[in-house]
Image (spheres, coloured by chain):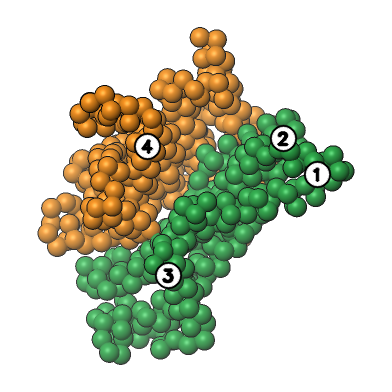
Amino acid sequence: MNTVRRYVLRKILGFFSTAFLISLVTFGALQVLPGDPATLILGTEASPEALISLRSQLGLDRPAIVRYGQWLVRFVQGDLGESIRYSIPVRELMGHAVPLTFTLAIMAVSAALLIAVPLGIVSATKQGTWFSKVIVVLSQLGMAMPQFWVGILFIEFFAVRIRIFPSGGYDGLLSLVLPALTLCMPRAAVLTRMVRAGMMSVLGQDYVRTARAKGLSERTVLYKHALANGAIGVFTIAGIQLTQLLAGTIVIEQVFGLPGLGQLLLAGVMQRDLPLVQGLVMLSGLLILFVNFVFDLILMLLDPRVRFE
Amino acid sequence: MEKRQWGFILVLFVVLITSIGLFYTPFDPTQVRVVDRFQPPSRTHWFGTDNFGRDILSRILVGGRWSLFVGGAAVFLGSTLGVFFGSIAGLGGKGWDEAFMRIADGLYALPSILIALLLATIWGPGRNTVLISIAVGNIPVFMRLTRSHILKVKEEPYIEAARALGASEFRILFRHILPNIKDTLLVQVSVSLAGAILAEASLSYLGVGIQPPDPSWGRMLRDAQPFAHLAPWTVIAPGLLIAVTVLGFNLMGDELIERR
């Protein structure tokens, strides 16, 4: 139990120190880098009075360290600041966006796993067959094709030509099907390769040979002995895949015109809405960090070896 | 034929047509000719024309130069810095290691696209914003690779021997450690190039990357999307070229992994 406690403690410590670093980067980027936020927002032709009043509204007349402290304290309390453009709290803006992006991400991860695990297992057990070769080629294509392109083609085919799905915008879960499918493709491609590689390495192990030698059915060998261990590797990768997925949602929301976090962030970037961008980037970083943290803990339960690293 | 060779051929193909585009295009890629808009592929316009009547083939030929430049420069910058910081972490002792790896963890939690959006808010969208973001996004991978290798071989007899002979840490790094991980790093460079091209294309598609009048495949897709149902050929070629480039770099990296 002691090793477990030490491991968890170390992970928690790591989580907070990394979170602190991300906050420094997110906040610091806007302070250290050249460019006056007030001029950025109002443009170079703004009157000096307007610039001064915006600077004090943004708190730019106070020292950076004070502003950082205030920003961090407010962030921890759940106050992400106020959007300059919309003049309402960032948190309110996020209200509708968060559930949409989350639903999309979860649908995509589930789809990726549903596709990747069976395909990976089959292509590992049937090595050298045409089926396995097709899967290898498909996974390469899945990783190479840009998601936004696939999305555009999907819309063209499934929404415009045969009209099964809506072509864009958000109107119920059905409008998330095409985006989720698009989003899951590269993830499924990578995961398939991982499952395949994991299974192939496990299938060569002594205990699998022993299981076969003692006469267990191929099914039991595959699913009870091999998959249980192959899954650990997949699980490690799945955490990283979730991170990538978040970056992917920004692009996919643009393709399908979905009003999620990505669209909000992009609007913030285009309108130079610093508090909005700052809050959202910080939140995304924290989210990614948290997901990885949770995955680390689950991995520790699945694979006791990592506790001693 | 081996996978790596396929990858090499695909990359060579893209480099070749991009080089041709530096000197020759069948039409002026930026010239607007409204009468020619939405021409389907034909003998004159092999890939058709877009909503401004611009020749798509010509735009494809010139659309890759900045993608390749931004991708190449970003990965070069990111890998150099990553190897440098990773070496300090690996050789510098526990304090440096702990500090640098925390920074790497922090960077890991911020994908290139997020960094790019953050920087674009301050600097405005554009080529340099994307280049720097992708470079920064690539630092942690190379840091971890270099560091973990150094930790593995640090106590090996041949390193100890070099140290006993009075070799400086600098010499040990450049003469003994880095030559050893050259292959691993090259694989990562190839895979990173694929990722960088994809990230640049995505950002240009989002409108944050390469800006008109500079052409880019990602931006072409952004501009063509509203007309995809009217003129499907406008969205086929740019996406295909991005996919071929990424596939090429991935395959080159892939085969190297298996050779190790």
Residue at point 67% right, 36% down? B151
Residue B159 rendering spot, x and y as whole percentages: 75, 41
Please state the chain letter of the residue tagged with numbered disc 3 in the rendered image. B
Type of amino acid at the residue the image marks with label 2: Glu
Residue A44 rendering spot, x and y as whole percentages: 61, 60
Which residue in the protein does label 3 denote?
B10
Chain identifier, orange in the render: A
* Residue A56 seen in render: no
Residue at point 26% right, 67% down? B228
Is residue B242 or residue A225 the one in the foreground? Answer: A225
Please state the chain letter of the residue tagged with numbered disc 4 in the rendered image. A
Q: Counting other residues with Cα less than 10 Å from the Cα at mark 3, is it few (<14), some (14-19), or many (20 or more)?
A: many
Type of amino acid at the residue the image marks with label 3: Leu
Residue B168 rendering spot, x and y as whole percentages: 84, 45
Which residue in the protein does label 4 denote?
A204
Q: Earlier in the sequence, mark 3 or mark 1?
A: 3
Is the residue B142 above or below the residue A100 in the image? below
